[in-house]
Amino acid sequence: MRIKYQHTPRGSTARDFPQNQRPISWGLIGLLVCLSVGIPLWAQGGDRNLKLAQTGNQFLSVGTDARTGALAGAGTALDLGANALFYNPAALANLETGLDIALNRNNWIADISHQSISVAINPFEGRFGIIGITFFDVDYGECLGTMVWPNDQGFIDTGPFYPTALAAGLGYARRLTDRFAAGGQVKYVAQYLGDVLHPADASIEIRRYSSDILAYDFGTLYRTPFRNLVFAMSVRNFSEEATYVRESFQLPLTFTIGASVDLFELLAWQNMEQQLRLSLDASHPRSHPEIMNLGAEYRLLDYLALRVGYQTNTDEYGISAGFGIELPRFAFDYAFTPAIHFVDIQRFTLRFYL
């Protein structure tokens, strides 16, 4: 369902938000937050000695929402319903239905699959904010274990094992004015990489390779008065270091600035039956050079959506595409991303509204 933006939140009047006071002040606050957080992080990008690919729990960097996947990940400034918690928690505040449920599946590379569910609850028509719950599960499939051994091969088989990973989150977002929203999420992140056998002096020592940690996401979203142009900012996977046995590592902290606009509205072409929304994300991951995500979504009669996207500065994939079909209280989205060396990536999303 295309979420329609209202200039005045439900349960409020125009007197609650004077145009010459609160919207402008909160907009300035949002801009200052973006600058204060973004400038230091983006400044690190100029450091050529900055270590990359030094993070763990990389599944947190993979999106499962099919709509955003078709747009090459450019979803920070979009209204994604319950799935907004995976990209920018602030966009959750624009939910207009009482309940939004999204089921996602991502057929990832190397026979890895991601399953996720997100639920958003709007108990009082947004007057006290929106509550969201997410669950993200990773299936790595079957792996074969080995152990160093003094034989001709130098190792022995220890049998199959099944690594897993998950993230469960609780989020909250609220419109602070009719144009500015903020939100956040706290999530429990865990990963299990199997029980590894280590030869000791006179026995075999079993070490369990697992970790768990709390991580935090937060973001802001500001709708400008200029033809519904939207600016947004998000910080995802902020946490302390996680530890496997003795070694510590960081989570894939990612800072993103995004923007979106309806091109038809920007050109003053008022067409209620069609929409062409352009979205742009500029991301600075901790484990990768800066990435630009570009997406375009064409909607017809609010029932059919065609999408295409492109991601820069990647070696494995760049172009993505997909479509969406929307019916009353139900929507289906599909995304396809061709890969160069691995299998092609496919994403599926089912959404239900009440």
Image: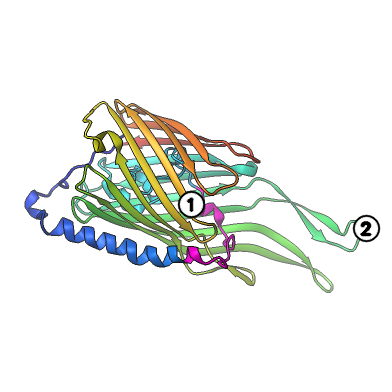
- Tag 1 and tag 2, C-beta contact below 8 Å: no
Q: Amino acid at mark 1?
A: Ile
The answer to whether residue 157 shows anywhere in this view is yes
Dot in front, 1 or 2 = 1
Residue 6 at what x, y percent from top left?
19, 42
Q: Which residue is mark 2?
A: 152
Number of dots carrying numbers: 2
Cα separation between marks 1 and 2 = 47 Å
- From the top left corner, tell me how far across and down residue 106 is, in percent: 53, 40
Q: Is residue 25 above or below residue 175?
A: below
Element type where label 2 sits in the image: loop
The residue lying furthest to the left in this view is 15
Q: Residue shown at 46%/64% (left/top)?
A: 214
Q: Earlier in the sequence, mark 1 or mark 2?
A: 2
| Disc number for residue 291 | 1
Whether 354 is among the magenta residues is no
The amino acid at mark 2 is Asp
